[in-house]
């Protein structure tokens, strides 16, 4: 089993930056593809970014490309999402997700482990 715990959410003004963290435990972290998803009220869960096991490859949703950066620290069992130029459309609960495998996949059904989420709110 894998346990994932997100942190770093909060209320920020439009144009600000925020860094989310996800701490993983319970399984060899370096064997896991990691991703961030988000879900706004009344909307489906949406892929945000993903990173391969060694951090060598990343994938971003078009709406965050160039503004968000995903990274990981395998020595600390952590994955991060650095968000900049936030706008009200970025407001959502952000979830950390993990899947055994090699490829970053942008669909939530492909991820077997999820954190509880952290709320991000952006005021205009």
Image (spheres, rainbow, N blue to C red):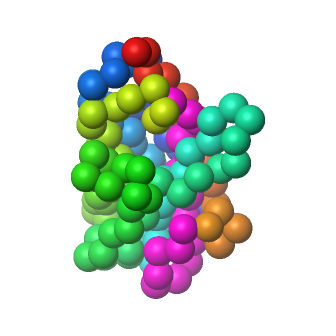
Left or right of 114 on screen, residue 35: left
Residue plotted at (70% across, 67% down): 109
Task: Report x, y in % for residue 50.
Answer: 43, 64
Task: Report x, y in % for residue 19.
Answer: 32, 36
Write the start and end of the magenta stretch as one range: 91-106
Q: Check residue 115 for magenta coloring.
A: no
Relative depth, front residue between 122 and 5: 122
The answer to whether one can see residue 4 in this image is no
Count of numbered circles in the view: 0
Against 40, residue 26 (above or below) is below
- Pick out the residue farthest to the right: 42
Left or right of 25 on screen, residue 8: left
Task: Report x, y in % for residue 48.
Answer: 47, 54
Relative depth, front residue between 71 and 42: 42
Residue 93 location, quadrant: top right
Against 22, residue 118 (above or below) is above
Residue plotted at (46% across, 26% down): 88
């Amino acid at each position: 089993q894998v346990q994932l715990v997100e942190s770093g959410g909060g209320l920020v003004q439009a144009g600000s930056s925020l860094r989310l963290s996800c701490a993983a435990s319970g399984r060899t972290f370096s064997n896991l593809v990691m991703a961030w998803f988000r879900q706004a009220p009344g909307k489906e869960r949406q892929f945000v970014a993903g990173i391969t096991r060694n951090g060598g490859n990343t994938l971003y949703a078009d709406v965050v490309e160039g503004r968000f950066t995903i990274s990981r620290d395998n020595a600390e069992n952590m994955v991060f999402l650095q968000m900049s130029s936030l706008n009200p459309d970025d407001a959502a609960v952000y979830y950390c997700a993990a899947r055994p495998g090699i490829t970053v996949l942008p669909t939530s059904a492909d991820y077997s482990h999820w954190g509880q989420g952290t709320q991000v709110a952006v005021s205009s």
